[in-house]
Amino acid sequence: MPEGVDDSPANARFASIAKKVKMGKRTEKALKEKAAASTSQEASEDDVNKVPEPYTCTGHFDPDFTELCRRAGLAPSEIPTVVIRAKRPGTPPPPDPKAKDPNPPEEAVDVAEEEPKPKTYVTKERFAYFKPCIQVEMENEDKPATVTEVYIRGWKIDDMMVGIFKTCFPTIEKLHTINFWNTGLTDKTLRDLAAIFPQCPNLKNIVIEGNPIPEEPWACIMGEDSLIINLSLRHNDITDRGASGISSALSTVTTCNKNLISLNLSHNKITDVGAEAIAKGLRMNRILLCLSLASNRITDKGAMKFGELLSRFPLTHEEVVERRKLLRDKGSPDRGSGKSPPPSRRAESKDRPGSVRSGSHLDKGDKKRDKSSKKKDNKHEKKNDKEDDKKGNKTVAIMDNKKDKDDGKGGTKKADTWKKAETVTKTTKGKKTTSSKDKKGGAMPESESPDMVEAINPLLESVESIEGQLWIPGNRSIISLNLSRNEIGEAGLKSILLAVQYQITLANLAPNPALKGLMRLSLGRNPIRADSEAYQKIQDLMLTRDPFYKAQAKSPDGDTQSLAG
């Protein structure tokens, strides 16, 4: 046995106990580490299964859009950036020759200085120009809540991006314009976007261009309750199928789009069938002011339909039935109290065929009584009697747009979808008188009443009975029509010329401040002869209709002087 080694039983027992203590500490440490690992694993599982709280948009488009993209799972490098839309620099004012230059030119220095970079563009890194971005315009660039316009150009908008727009667009209070150009929209994404537009409180202008969709669901953007005022659908390959849907969205016999005033359908594939459908949609629409069908495939047949629309046209059976319903609801004030209308009102109804009206013995008796009492009647009655004598069995003009004086005394009135305002401005003998009333029923002073005009339902306008059909004046609310770069020839021009002449004659005989008729008509780049008489007449007539036209005045010497500023 080596020296210095104690081999006693006590030492052996001590070594055994120390070994056990050491093993116990190791076991306890391993158990603690195992418990900590299981706890961290459970916590991580809870984090994965935990649903994040929904994000509440603040109305600041840039941070809201970025956060929603991050939550949707996009990497930071994949999130489109929000940038201020570049603007063309304004033209500097011309220098004043009388003003002294505060900075006189210094002597030329030989040291070559580097020219400052131009401020009309911004340099970017390689391929950064092609990265998707969203361009915005603001009222005040220092205030992120003043975004007014959003432009998305050249990158695809998918379902995930539409969902992000659905969350953040309605919270932008001052947003009034959205522009989508070449964004690869589909039938589903367009319908989803159309459902978002009514939720934006001040959205008025929609531009969707370069997005051909085979299903052509364009009518979903411009429903009856749509608040859009200006809509542009250029370069979308819209065919007659899409034009038919747009026609129904503009108006039917019972419905009408009440807000859209400008529609641009240029650079599409609309033929005469589509043009006829759009003309049909404008028969009962008196809201749309500007229509562009430039660069389509419209020929003389389609142009003739627009000529008929702008002059006058006969009512269909469905329209006649709807007209009678409106007259029934608006006609007699005693109808609501259960009383039958007086016989004279029934005799004045000209919606019945001429044979039934002329064969009635009551009508003949009424005419004799009218002739015998002509001298005793007042001025108004004399005028009506003379009209009755002249009419006979010939063409009958019925003025159904006169307001019933007793409308408010108990008659039932149908909700008029064409009504734009309650205050009506009438023009009588060159003077304007207002028929608006205050709360007490008295007439308001002329200075306090606003100058507003009521849009009358076309079915309640004056009609003419011609060969058993009821004809009404055409659409005179359209003031700008663009049919350039089509295939319209001489026959189409003659039809449009007659429509323009009819509108001018009607405006001179019965002026209406709300229905002025065409003021601008574009027919250029059509296959028209250079010496076309119809085209030259149209140009001459429309020159005087242009609101910016100023006639030439003659000087005392007899020379003409232009009044143009």
Image (cartoon, helix red, strand yellow):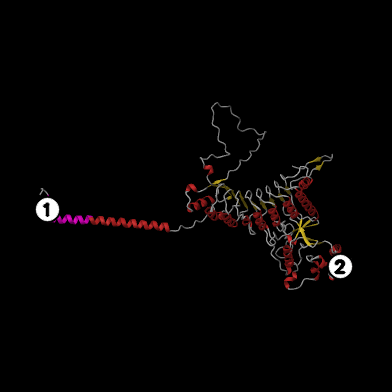
Q: Quadrant of the C terminus?
A: top right
- In whole angstroms, how far apart are the C-alphas of marks 1 and 2? 152 Å
Residue at the disc numbered 1: 7
Range of residues picked out in magenta: 5-22
Q: For this view, does 72 lie left or right of residue 386?
A: left
Label the magenta part by its dominant secondary structure.
Answer: helix
Residue sitting at 37 percent across and 58 percent down? 42
Classify mark 2: helix, strand or loop. Answer: helix
Q: Is residue 221 visible?
A: yes
Callout 1: few (<14), some (14-19), or many (20+) C-alpha neighbours within 10 Å?
few
Front one among 542 and 240: 240
Which percent across, then down, holds residue 262? 67, 52
Which image quarter: residue 438? bottom right
Which percent across, then down, holds residue 82? 53, 47
Front one among 191 and 143: 191
Residue sitting at 32 percent across and 58 percent down? 35
Residue 11 in magenta? Answer: yes
Mark 1–mark 2 CB contact (< 8 Å): no
Residue 224 in magenta? Answer: no
Q: Is residue 94 above or below residue 392?
A: above
Q: For this view, does 368 lie left or right of residue 203?
A: right
Give the amino acid type for the residue marked by disc 2 in the picture. Answer: Lys
Q: Is residue 491 above or below residue 418?
A: above
Give the amino acid type for the residue marked by disc 1 in the picture. Answer: Asp
Which image quarter: residue 167? bottom right
Which image quarter: residue 9? bottom left
Residue at the disc numbered 2: 367
Front one among 408 and 413: 413
Classify mark 1: helix, strand or loop. Answer: loop
Q: Earlier in the sequence, mark 1 or mark 2?
A: 1
Q: For this view, does 85 lie left or right of residue 344?
A: left
